[in-house]
Amino acid sequence: MNQELNNLVQSLRDELQQYGEMLVRLDRHHQSAADPSEREVHAFSREVQIQGEAIQRARRERNQACQNLAVLLNLNAVVPVEILIPLIPEDYQPLVNELTRENHQLMEQVVESLQRKRSCTRN
């Protein structure tokens, strides 16, 4: 089980890193010129798309790690990490819980930032 737990922790860390990188890109773009050129808009859109794909990969890896752990625990293979937390060894629970909380928090910040950007481009 240690390998599966370590895989889950690593996948949560990777996901957290990808959300953080998206926020850096979005913040950098928000701070740039108020009237970007078409080329700058296209470059930014491409960066966001590439980072979005990285986030999706990280989420898939996290879901796979959850599935692997769930199977090991004789659960349905499609179980969210929040369901697994009380079932894993106590020494892992605080770390997995905190990584999960931070991922949710950063995901919400990414969504809010993208919504702000959309509302700015519509005005």
Image: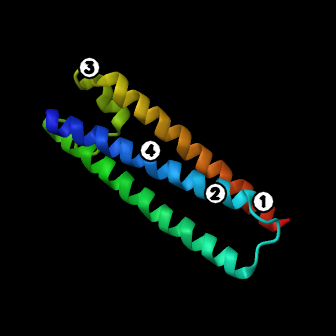
Decide if residue 121 is in sight here: yes
Numbered badge on residue 34: none
Label 3 element class: loop
Task: Tell me the kind of residue under disc 2.
Answer: Leu
Decide if residue 70 is in sight here: no
Q: Earlier in the sequence, mark 1 or mark 2?
A: 2
Contact (CB < 8 A) between labels 4 and 2?
A: no
Residue for point 73% across, 62% down:
118
**Dot 2 alpha-carbon crowd within 10 angstroms: few under 14, some 14 to 19, many 20 or more:** some
Residue named by callout 1: 119
Q: Earlier in the sequence, mark 3 or mark 4?
A: 4
Where, by quadrant of the figure, is residue 31 drawn?
Answer: bottom right
Numbered badge on residue 16: 4
Contact (CB < 8 A) between labels 2 and 3?
A: no
CA distance for labels 1 and 3: 44 Å
Query: Would residue 104 be found to the left or right of residue 78 on screen?
Result: right
CA distance for labels 2 and 3: 35 Å
Numbered badge on residue 91: 3
Residue named by callout 2: 26
Residue for point 59% across, 50% down:
110
Where, by quadrant of the figure, is residue 72 drawn?
Answer: top left
